[in-house]
Amino acid sequence: MKKSFLVLSILLLANSIIAQRNVKDSIIGTPWIGVQYGANWTSGDLADRYGFMNHVGIMAGYKTNKNWFWGLESNFMFGNDVRMTGVFDHLIDSQGNITDVNGDIALVLVYARGLNVNLAVGKVFPVLSPNKNSGIFVHAGVGYLAHRMRVETQEQVIPQLELDYKKGYDRFTAGPNAHQFLGYAFMSNAGFLNFYGGFYIQEGFTQNKRTIFFDQPTIPVSSETRLDIQYGVKVGWFIPFYKRQPKEFYYN
């Protein structure tokens, strides 16, 4: 109950702040703070490891009174489409099973996981918009990308896949990242309807960070730079924070 009251209070406060300015009157400099979701497909070297990936993240930045935007975004990446095969073949017994420490048939689950953090610089062009603060929104930037395969054995104990041994299979990879976005940003004249959406692509120039893969112990781990591409759509909802307008007084 207390949490619900706190969330409601924050939303009401944000609405009160937003209502203090009418964005259709002028271009307004304001912080943007929001949440976002991205649906991404993979290409380049990343497509050899993973398929479709989700991005869920936050964005914090500032739109100037010239409609320039700069900010920082961070996204948690996750997916179930792991395309690597044969990683655990050497753990399979003559019956075709992986067994746990008790000799029971084990279930090994794998997922794609990752993180990116990007600096962004862009601009809003007031085209096809209800006010001068909305319109075509473009931005680009650089940052950091990391991804790995998450290995889960549920409640079972498989000695070869416990603790630090998982690092020999997870293909942890990281490096610099670049991104580009082309879409539309909408700031309502009043209220909570503030959003952006569009097409997104990122290019990671990454390297393997593990020195050995346990499933390929005799093959040296490549140190070459990879090109990890993700592309898709991104949508976000944000709250702008305006300065309070001075009150006007009229005297007879």
Image (cartoon, rainbow, N blue to C red):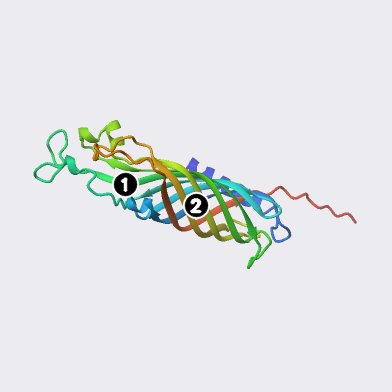
- Closer mark to the observer between disc 2 and disc 1: 1
Left/right placement of residue 53 relative to residue 75 reads left
Q: Name the residue under label 2.
A: 36
> Percent x, y for residue 94?
9, 43
Quarter of the picture holding the C terminus: bottom right
Look at the picture and state if 109 lies above or below 186: above
Among the 4 quarters of the image, the one containing residue 145: top left
Q: How many labels does the image show?
A: 2
> Percent x, y for residue 249?
83, 52
Left/right placement of residue 93 relative to residue 135 reads left
Look at the picture and state if 165 lies above or below 137: above
What number is the disc on residue 243? none
Which sits in the foreground, 12 or 150? Answer: 150
Q: Is mark 2 on a helix, strand or loop?
A: strand
Q: Mark 1 points at which residue?
A: 111
Marks 2/1: CA distance? 21 Å
Which amino acid, by three-letter code, is at mark 1? Tyr
Which sits in the foreground, 130 or 94? Answer: 94
Q: How crowded is mark 1: few (under 14 residues within 10 Å), some or many (20 or more)?
A: some
Which residue is at a point 28% across and 49% down the rendered structure image?
84
Which residue is at a point 56% across and 52% down the rendered structure image?
140
Which sits in the foreground, 124 or 189? Answer: 124
Residue furthest out toward the left: 94
Which amino acid, by three-letter code, is at mark 2? Gln
Which residue is at a point 40% across and 41% down the rendered structure image?
207
> Percent x, y for residue 196?
55, 58
